[in-house]
Image: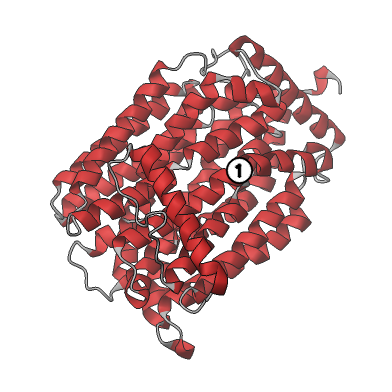
Amino acid sequence: MASTAITPEFEKATYAKVAAKLIPFLFICYVVNFLDRVNVGFAKLQMAGDLKFSDAVYGFGAGVFFIGYFIFEVPSNIILEKVGARAWIARIMITWGLISTAFMFTGSIDLGVLSAPLCEFFAWASYLFNTVFSLGFIQPKIMPGEATCTNPEVAFYTLRFLLGVAEAGFFPGIILYLTYWFPGHRRAKMVALFMTAIGVSQLIGSPVSGAIMQWTDGHSGWHGWQWLFLLEGLPSVLIGILVLIVLPNGPRSAKWLTPQEQDFIVKRVEEDNASKAHLGGKHNLSGAFADYRVWALAIVYFCGAVCFYAVSLWMPTTIQELGIDKKDYLKVGLISMIPWGASIISMIYWGSHSDKTGERRWHSATGFLVQMAGLVILALSHKSPIMSIVGLTLITIGWAGYVVTFWSLPTAFLASTAAAAGIALINSVGNLGGYVGPEMVGRIRQASGGDATNAFFLLGGVALVGALIILLLPRTQAERTGTSAR
């Protein structure tokens, strides 16, 4: 490819074509992914009463997803790099869609002779994770050797764990996949556009979930929460099949690119990877695991996950307790649109502004600080509707700003296999916060008669820790020079 053929117009048109072909489809994939991950928060409004789940049972079940996710995350992302994005992302989506749909049978699944050992397994998981992450201050839901679980509880825990296993590798796989196409200085905006799917899934999914539960309850003898899992699980299976048809493994297999465009994209990515050397760039598996920055960023992501999932998986309950009728699920969904709608605007603005300025660390850290402010307001609101919604909105705005710029930090010094392993390691270790957050809120609520004030103050402290680590960690922000990675 002759360098004289590369004009600014050609470069702009090529990346615009790639973005138009990939981002909308990946966006849809992530919408159904995230909806299947967190719709349990809405299902809980009805499911908990039907199956007699306490706050502690729901909190542990919501969080145990992330234990399965943690165990299989790194292997899944390495497999994706070896077998190709198309086949592996399709596998992930189809299996998680089927498992998500199976939640509709939570109340009728009887695991027979497996029930007792599974109950004991989850007892040990609860004990170990609570001991490690709360330093023993929070007692687990079920104690090893003393565990007794109802059939619905065992089924709920098992399906949530399996959903985490099935989904492991999807998000870090997409982040890795985007590094095949976009150099660092273009990637934050692409990640922002892709990750707005989280806000959109909640913006659309909240009223839809509420409407499904309210209007289908009792049809064909099924509860509304059963219809919710069925109607929101099957689309993942169908879109997973589409992945096999339309998603290229990389630039070289994209038939809609000309040979010149393929050469250009590959060359820019290679240049981007080479530019990481001055940041102590890592390219192999051992390099990723040995780099202290990877582990530090995993702690940052852990802090973010603790705050996000503690709030998002309990948000329908938090909003319902502001004085909404217990059976008006649609109203809960409509009010939930306010913070999630704000998060979409925040994510797009924050990502674009970060790309424009070339700054990453302060953008991400500031997001944590905004989250902290929202959590403190929520803790002090005393269930005041206006103050609670302001607090929830600041939390989602801050989370969106932090997370959309966060992934530019590890990809600034990781490449090749190290990128696959490092991204997966950060995501898997970090997402253990998704276990800690919901479980912590559930335990504190149960111990405080349904009051989560202390939980929100504690979460505010966690957000502050995340911000400080980002700002103190060196060599994760490249200097802005031309088209080099930032």
What kind of element bears circle 1?
A: helix
The percent position of residue 63, horizontal first and vertical second, equals: 43, 52
Instruction: In this rendered view, identify the residue nearer to me: 35 or 23.
Output: 35
Question: Where the N terminus falls, by quadrant?
Answer: top right
Q: Residue at x 80, y 40 (%)?
A: 257
Whether residue 152 is visible here, answered yes or no, is yes
Instruction: In this rendered view, identify the residue nearer to me: 130 or 482.
Output: 130
In which quarter of the view is residue 92 placed?
bottom right
The percent position of residue 278, horizontal first and vertical second, equals: 62, 9
Q: Residue at x 56, y 68 (%)?
A: 114
Q: Is residue 326 above or below residue 294?
A: below
Q: Residue at x 51, y 48 (%)?
A: 67
Q: Is residue 207 above or below residue 301?
A: below
Return the residue at label 1: 73
Extreme residue in the top direction: 278
Mark 1 Cα shell of 10 Å, populated few (<14), some (14-19), many (≥20): many
Instruction: In this rendered view, identify the residue nearer to me: 216 or 169.
Output: 169
